[in-house]
Amino acid sequence: MRALTELVQLRPVLAAESVFRSQTRADHVIAVLEGVVGLGSIGPQGQFHLERSAHGPAWLDISSAWVGQGHTQDAQAMGPALLLELPVKSLRPLLHRYPDLQDRFMLALAQTVQSLTGVTHDLMAKDAQKRLISWLLQRMAAPAGEVALRERKRELAAQLAITPETLSRLLRQLMAAGLIEVKGYSIKLLKLADLRALAQA
């Protein structure tokens, strides 16, 4: 931990500040310690199109620097945030010296790949309602059956590849069917068996 701590670089960013740009050379693995950073693309007029968000603590880009390529997306702070950056050039020797640390990074990479593979499958194979239900089931806190919403509506809609208006409509439909109950920033899943059947239909 001491060796790793010596490499850590902390970087505070302000709301709407660019964290990194796509295709720029990546030489650090980057995590969000506090706050929220959006990943997406910056349009020709400078507008940021959100595709997904990372809520700290979470890895923001743990892969690009290892392959010596540029970042695959643009990243922008959704509010004040604190980033952790580790230079791969200095990190690489540590992984050889400390096998446990190497295993941790391998696990983090594998979890990232697994998560993105699942997202890709859902986008290709499921309609909007199924994607929303799957998202809710994955984030449900057992045994209470509740989902605490950390994302704003537009952030969640972007993750599901739908518009905020479509998200609101889908939530109303699930509420009208007696499947969920929305209270502020919490969603209670009422009929788990029915929701699971809809997600797999």
Image (tube, grey):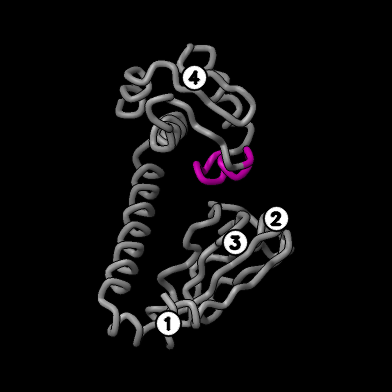
Q: Is residue 66 above or below residue 83?
A: below
- Mark 4 sits on what residue? 180
State the CA–CA distance, disc 1 to disc 2. Answer: 31 Å
Q: Position of residue 65 (x, y in %)?
A: 44, 78
Find out whether residue 159 is within the magenta segment.
Answer: yes
Q: Position of residue 38 (x, y in %)?
A: 59, 56
- Toward which corner of the image does residue 156 lie, by quadrant? top right
| Residue 124 as seen in the image, left or right of residue 182 | left
- Mark 3 sits on what residue? 41
Question: Which of labels 2 and 3 is toward the front?
Answer: 2
State the CA–CA distance, disc 4 to disc 2. Answer: 30 Å
N-terminal label among 2 and 3: 3
Residue 3: which disc? 1
Q: Are marks 1 and 2 in contact (CB under 8 Å)?
A: no
Residue at x-position 51% and y-position 57%: 57
Of 103 and 110, which appears nearest the observer?
Answer: 103
Q: Are marks 3 and 1 in contact (CB under 8 Å)?
A: no
Find out whether residue 112 is within the magenta segment.
Answer: no
- Provide the residue span drawn in magenta: 152-162
Q: Are marks 2 and 3 in contact (CB under 8 Å)?
A: no
Q: Secondary structure at mark 3?
A: strand
| Residue 90 as seen in the image, left or right of residue 40 | left
